[in-house]
C-alpha cells in the first residue's frame, strides 16, 4: 500500500477512535471540554483558567523546540476529540493551518491567543522565520500575556458556557498575579545600571519593549538560524565597546554560540528562559510561567546591576 494512502487511512481510523473516545467521555459523565494548547505558555494560561473543569493537553511535547516542531498523524487524529484548540499565532506555529484542515472537527473552538494584541515588527537577522514580519514571542510581556489569557478565557467560555463564572473568576485571579509580576519587573529593571541584554535568539523583544531594555540577539526569531562569521565578529566588537559582561542562553537551544561569543570577549553566560517550551526536568520540579518569569527577573537583576 502506498505510504500516502497508509497515512490517510491511519488518520481516518484514528479520527474515528477519537470520536468514540469523546462519546465515551460524555457517556461516563465526564463532560469536560478537551482543550489542546499548542505551546507551553498557552498550556500554562489555559491551566490557570480552566483548572479542574477542563481536560488539558499540550501539543508540542516537553523538551521540543517549538519553532521547528511538526505535528504527527496521531495528533491530527486525536484532534477529533478536541473541543478547544489554543495557539499563540504570529507564525509561532506554522503548522497550525495544515493541522486544522486535516483534523475535520466542525465543533472545534479555535483561538489565536495573540489576536487583537499590539505586535512588534522584527526586521533583524532571521526575520524570514516569520512570514508576517512580527515577533511571535508575545507572552514574555506580562501585560500582553494577560490579554492572551483573556482570549483563552473567552474561548473556554464559548465551549463551556455553564462554567462561565468559574473561568472568569480564575482569569481575574491569574490577571492579578500577572499585574504583580509586571510591577516587580518595572520596579527592579527601572533601577538597572545597564539596559543591554545579549540573547541567543530574538525572543525577548516584548520584554525589552515593556521594560526599557535593549535586546541584542545572536540569532534571529528562530534559534536554529545561526549568524554568519561576520555577524559574530560585529557582535563581539559591540560587546567589547559597550563592556557587556553577560551572554544569555536558553534551556532548549544549544549554548554553543553563547559560549563562543562569551569566550571571545571574556564575558559570562547565564540562562534566560524564553518559555516557549519547558524541559521535562523543569516540569517535574514544578516550574511554571510565573515562577520562571520571576527567576528570569532575578537573573536580570544579578547581571544588569542595580
Image (tube, rainbow, N blue to C red):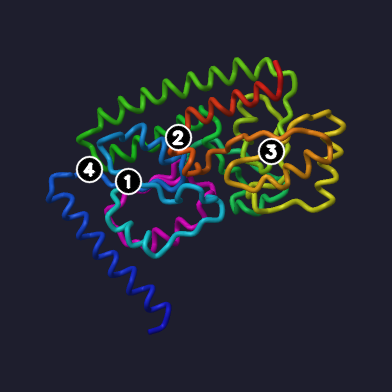
Say left or right for 49 vs 208: left
Label of residue 285 in the image: 2
Instruction: Give the spatial CA distance, label 4 vs label 3.
Output: 41 Å
Disc 4 packing (10 Å; few <14; some 14–19; many ≥20): some
Q: Which residues are magenta?
A: 84-113
Give the residue pinned by disc 3: 199
Q: Are marks 2 and 3 in contact (CB under 8 Å)?
A: no
Q: Are marks 4 and 3 in contact (CB under 8 Å)?
A: no
Percent coordinates x, y for residue 292 in the rendering: 52, 31
The C terminus - image quarter: top right
Label of residue 284 in the image: none
Q: Nearer the viewer, mark 1 or mark 3?
A: 3
Q: Nearer the viewer, mark 4 or mark 3?
A: 3
Q: Are marks 2 and 1 in contact (CB under 8 Å)?
A: no
Q: Reading the chain from its start, which is encountered first: label 4 or label 2?
A: 4
75 is higher (above) or lower (below) than 116? below
Q: Reading the chain from its start, which is encountered first: label 2 or label 1?
A: 1
86 inside magenta stretch: yes
Give the residue pinned by disc 4: 32
Amino acid at each position: 500500500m502506498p505510504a500516502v494512502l497508509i497515512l490517510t487511512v491511519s488518520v481516518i481510523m484514528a479520527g474515528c477512535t477519537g470520536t468514540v473516545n469523546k462519546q465515551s467521555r460524555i457517556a461516563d459523565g465526564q463532560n469536560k471540554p478537551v482543550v489542546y494548547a499548542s505551546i507551553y505558555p498557552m498550556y500554562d494560561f489555559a491551566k490557570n483558567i480552566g483548572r479542574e473543569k477542563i481536560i488539558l493537553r499540550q501539543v508540542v511535547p516537553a523538551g521540543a523546540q517549538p519553532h521547528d516542531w511538526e505535528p504527527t498523524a496521531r495528533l491530527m487524529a486525536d484532534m477529533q476529540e478536541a473541543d478547544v484548540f489554543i495557539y499563540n499565532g504570529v507564525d509561532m506555529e506554522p503548522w497550525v493551518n495544515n493541522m486544522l484542515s486535516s483534523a475535520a472537527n466542525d465543533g472545534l473552538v479555535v483561538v489565536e491567543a495573540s489576536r487583537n494584541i499590539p505586535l512588534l515588527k522584527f526586521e533583524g537577522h532571521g526575520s524570514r522565520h516569520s512570514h508576517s514580519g512580527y515577533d511571535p514571542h508575545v507572552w514574555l510581556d506580562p501585560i500582553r500575556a494577560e490579554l492572551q489569557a483573556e482570549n483563552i478565557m473567552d474561548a473556554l467560555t464559548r465551549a463551556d458556557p455553564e462554567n462561565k463564572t468559574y473561568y472568569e473568576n480564575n482569569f481575574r485571579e491569574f490577571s492579578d498575579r500577572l499585574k504583580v509580576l509586571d510591577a516587580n519587573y518595572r520596579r527592579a529593571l527601572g533601577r538597572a545600571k545597564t539596559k543591554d541584554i545579549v540573547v541567543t535568539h530574538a525572543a525577548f523583544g516584548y520584554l525589552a519593549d515593556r521594560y526599557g531594555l535593549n535586546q541584542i540577539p545572536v540569532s534571529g526569531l528562530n534559534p536554529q538560524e545561526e549568524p554568519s562569521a561576520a555577524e559574530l565578529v560585529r557582535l563581539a566588537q559591540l560587546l567589547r565597546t559597550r563592556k557587556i559582561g553577560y551572554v544569555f542562553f536558553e534551556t532548549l537551544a544549544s549554548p554553543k554560540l553563547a559560549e563562543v561569543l562569551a569566550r571571545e570577549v571574556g564575558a559570562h553566560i547565564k540562562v534566560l528562559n524564553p518559555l516557549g517550551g519547558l524541559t521535562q526536568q523543569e516540569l517535574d520540579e514544578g516550574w511554571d510561567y510565573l515562577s520562571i518569569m520571576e527567576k528570569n527577573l532575578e537573573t536580570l537583576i544579578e547581571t544588569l546591576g542595580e
